[in-house]
């Protein structure tokens, strides 16, 4: 009897239970089915460590959530932790000294040795100090295609953008909307970026997004993209929806042929029990150039005085970066893990394609890493207006785009 008691006592001691179990309020905008399933993996890990995850989900995706998050931190009502996209979204908060420096933890745990690509840490680094824990690599560079819609239309599932646009009449003939697009402005602007990378190429895209080169915006390559995007506007006629996951659901249910959307759409297919390669097809780089962008989500931790909260923040940051949590979260989210030393053999075909492209090095930074939130918002507003008002010509929107890039900070 005594021996079993000693073993039980030893096991209990082995679970690192914090001296002071702490509640942390965590803000994020992961409210779709797939996103909620993924973020639940973070909460489960934090609670299993003896602390308490207080969920602060904000509906309406990033465009709604970010201003709320930023104003709370600036206004002195900080949450314990928050999701943001890694890149420039927290830049002003960091410069104002409002965010926790994670560098000591990152050095102690060797984040630079396992985070892959290391550019993810660069996107968390300001003046040589690390201020976020990157939790995934997500890529915008995908189109998701419904097998049911193409079976109904009696045409093969497209293998690239040109075949997709050519399939539109056959889809329309059976009452299927070719391209699902919700009304949130970031959806339209994101789709434009993906089309630019596919049709003009990554280098030309970088000349604009990174170098802010106005001549390139007005040049022949971008002219062709604005014209292609203008022509694509009619492809979403009839998709009267707002949220991105409603658009994904149109593809899942065969009401739409396809959706240009980041890999977070995968979480929705998974919650709907759809199988990549059987129920839907994913084309990285719209089937034109197999590429992924290495944007993503990261957790930031507002600076607080309370020592217990500070300690809990570091426990959470450490958990988010751990192998087991990285696998559990990213498999549900549909994104790629931030570390290359994990077993993702259970990943589906689309995730495996993303991992192969990542390993090939055909990667691209995300716009969030080069454009300020203010510039991003201006471009989003311009592109959603263009998409919804067919009286605006490609030449007119091109000029508007160029003037925003000219003033981009
Ligand atoms: C992005 C976020 C993704 C996904 C998407 C739609 O900003 O990084 O994880 O949530 O919004 O909400």
Image (cartoon, rainbow, N blue to C red):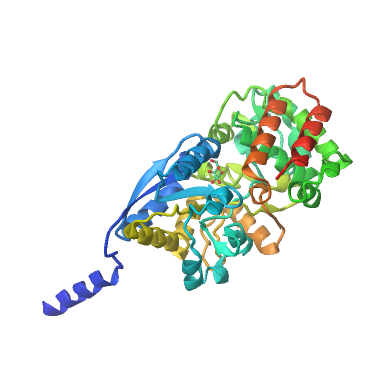
Residue at (72, 44) in percent of width and height:
286
Q: Is residue 27 above or below residue 244?
A: below
In this rendering, does residue 323 appear at all? yes
Viewport quadrant of the C terminus? top right
Is 365 located above or below residue 69 in the figure?
below
Q: Is residue 254 left or right of residue 196?
A: left
Q: Is residue 309 left or right of residue 295?
A: left
Outermost residue toward the top in this view:
391
Where is residue 151? Give x, y as percent: 64, 34
Residue 290 percent coordinates (x, y): 72, 53
Camera-nearest residue between 400 and 232 = 400
Indicate left or right for 405 with 187 as reference. right
**Extreme residue toward the bottom, this view:** 3
Could you tell me residue 12's position as x and y percent?
A: 23, 69
Residue 284, placed above or below residue 2: above
Q: Quadrant of residue 232?
A: top right
Rendered residue at 59%/34% (across/down): 251
Residue 154 in sight: no
* Picture mark count: 0
Q: Quadrant of ligand 1?
A: top right
Between 149 and 120, the residue placed more toward the observer is 120
Q: In the picture shown, does residue 7 fall above or below 244?
A: below
Q: Residue at x 66, y 63 (%)?
A: 359
**Image quarter in which the N terminus is found:** bottom left
Most distant residue in the right direction: 220
Front-most of residues 57 and 107 = 107
Percent of width and height locating residue 48: 32, 58
Of all residues, the one furthest to the left in this rendering is 1
């Amino acid at each position: 009897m005594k021996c079993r008691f000693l073993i039980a006592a030893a096991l209990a001691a082995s679970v690192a239970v914090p001296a002071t179990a702490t509640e942390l309020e965590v803000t994020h905008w992961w409210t779709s089915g797939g996103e909620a399933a993924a973020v639940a993996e973070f909460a489960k890990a934090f609670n299993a460590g003896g602390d308490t995850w207080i969920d602060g989900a904000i509906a309406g995706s990033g465009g709604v959530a970010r201003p709320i998050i930023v104003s709370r931190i600036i206004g002195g009502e900080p949450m314990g932790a928050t999701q943001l996209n890694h890149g420039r979204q927290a830049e002003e908060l960091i410069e104002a000294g409002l965010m926790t420096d994670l560098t000591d933890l990152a050095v102690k745990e060797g984040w630079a040795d396992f985070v892959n690509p290391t550019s993810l840490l660069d996107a968390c680094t300001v003046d040589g100090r690390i201020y976020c824990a990157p939790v995934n690599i997500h890529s915008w560079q995908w189109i998701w295609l419904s097998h049911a819609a193409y079976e109904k239309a009696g045409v093969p599932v497209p293998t690239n953008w040109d075949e997709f646009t050519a399939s539109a009449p056959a889809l329309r003939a059976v009452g299927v909307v070719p391209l699902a697009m919700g009304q949130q402005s970031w959806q339209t602007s994101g789709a434009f970026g993906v089309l630019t990378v596919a049709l003009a190429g990554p280098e030309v895209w970088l000349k604009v997004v990174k170098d802010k080169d106005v001549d390139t915006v007005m040049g022949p390559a971008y002219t062709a993209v604005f014209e292609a995007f203008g022509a694509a506007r009619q492809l979403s006629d009839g998709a009267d929806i707002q949220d991105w996951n409603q658009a994904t659901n149109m593809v899942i249910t065969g009401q739409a042929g396809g959706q240009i959307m980041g890999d977070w759409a995968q979480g929705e297919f998974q919650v709907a029990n759809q199988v990549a390669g059987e129920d839907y097809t994913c084309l990285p780089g719209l089937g034109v150039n197999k590429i992924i962008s290495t944007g993503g989500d990261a957790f930031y931790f507002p600076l607080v005085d309370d020592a217990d909260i500070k300690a809990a923040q570091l426990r959470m940051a450490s958990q988010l970066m751990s192998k087991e949590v990285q696998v559990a979260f990213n498999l549900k989210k549909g994104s790629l893990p931030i570390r290359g030393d994990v077993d993702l053999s259970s990943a589906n075909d689309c995730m495996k394609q993303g991992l192969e492209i990542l390993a090939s090095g055909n990667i691209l930074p995300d716009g969030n890493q080069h454009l300020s939130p203010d510039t991003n918002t201006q471009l989003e507003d311009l592109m959603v207006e263009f998409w919804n008002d067919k009286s605006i010509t490609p030449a007119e929107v091109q000029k508007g785009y160029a003037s925003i890039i000219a003033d981009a900070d």
